[in-house]
Amino acid sequence: MATAPRQFDVIVLGAGAAGLMCAAVAGQRGRRVLLLEHNGQPGRKILISGGGRCNFTNQHCSPENFLSENPHFAKSALSLYQPHHFLELVEKYGIPWHEKTLGQLFCDHSSRAILDMLLAECALGKVEILLNAHNVRVESASHGFSVETSLGAFAAPALVVATGGLSIPKMGASGLAYELAGQFNLAVVPPRPALVPLLLGGNEAGWTDLAGVAADVIAYACGGTRFREKMLVTHRGLSGPAVLQASSYWRPGEPLTVDFAPEVNGILKPLTEPRSRRDFAGLRQALRAVLPQRLASFLAEAGAPTGWSNAALAACEQRLHRWDFHPVGTEGFEKAEVTAGGVATDHLQARTMETRTVPGLFFIGEAVDVTGHLGGFNFQWAWASAVAAGRAV
């Protein structure tokens, strides 16, 4: 005779940032919460984030920092739970932190402090956490959902899917959220790697000889969004914050446009002055005045003018401000920090993250078609969407 499933008020799938936060909020509201995780430890991506120091939010968070097919969807959750709310929690636990550039907040020491804080919050809410829960199967039940796993069967009127996306598979990423969305007839915006290095090939393969060279640039994403940060040339293509940001918007076949000398006008003016050298040596010298030497030498060859007239030099300078790369692909989900796309927001209620057609079913965090820019924004979406659901279940 089959054992009856254990009953809870809420079952949360996935003990990452969003799942832990949601479980804690729901538990502290008096809900009996079960948190299921298929890895052997919770919060694995939290631990590796921010170089091990967890860029846990951004002071300047706004809806404009997020990419979605519905750019307005994230506004509600983000306004209800803002960076200062999470910072209050961090300070309540005495976790030392600091601000880096562009409003990014990091732990002074280890990201373990953020994970321990979330686990402590779950303990306050008497959340039951089960690890190594494999072979998860979800079915509709008479009063909600039944969830069968390798650890047993469970049931609850509310189910929160916080299983993330496909990025960093070595951390246990899976497509379970998309499978469950399909099971309940919810559309999914095709997942793709985001915040990911871009690959160069063909005529641009020579750029990889500059591996290790970095420069302050503006990278223009499709649609006109611009990011002024560092670009890093790698042995396979382009990376660095500016390129990672733009990669979330990039589509195969489209160019990536880079300004190598932001706000620097007249780079080649020295070549137009009386008795100046109008040759490769003069070009290289002018570029080295504003760019790293190896990059300057490379651009002197790759971007040399078709002649040395004033018009040719002006066209050469203009290209330096609007240089088109033609990536042949990305480094894929293995190197992507997050997954763009996910459960279509048309199917979700913005204030609660509950699905419109399946009462009691919620999707939060990276599983949803809301993707933040680099710099703590994806964590803030995890916290905000989790709190929205945790207050509603």
Image (cartoon, rainbow, N blue to C red):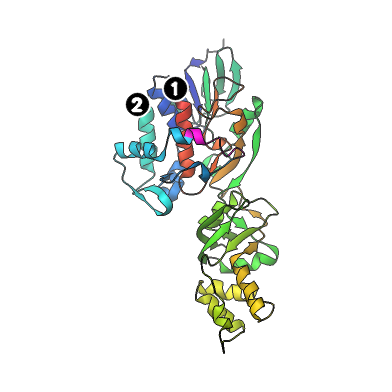
Q: Determine which quarter of the picture holds residue 43.
A: top left
Residue 17 visible here? no
Q: Which residue is mark 1?
A: 33
The one nearer the camera, 164 or 153, is 164
Task: Mark 1: give few (<14), some (14-19) or many (20+) Cα within 10 Å.
Answer: many
- Magenta stretch: residue 74 in it? yes
Q: Which residue shows up at 70% across the image and 54% down it?
A: 253
Question: Between disc 2 and disc 1, whose residue precedes?
Answer: 1
Image coords of residue 239 (percent x, y): 55, 58
Query: The residue tagged with tag 2: helix, strand or loop?
Result: helix
Q: Which residue shows up at 56% across the image and 39% down it?
A: 370
Task: Please identify the quadrant where the N terminus is shown.
Answer: top right
The one nearer the camera, 32 or 298, is 298
Q: Which residue shows up at 43% across the image and 52% down it?
A: 102
Residue type for callout 1:
Val
Image coords of residue 97 (percent x, y): 33, 47
The magenta span reads: 69-77
> Is residue 51 depicted above or below 290 in this figure?
above
Q: Residue most toward the top?
A: 1
Q: Which residue is mark 2?
A: 124
Residue 319 visible here? yes
Seen in the image, is 126 located left or right of residue 176? Answer: left
Residue type for callout 2:
Leu
Circle on res. 11: none
Image coords of residue 201 (percent x, y): 67, 62
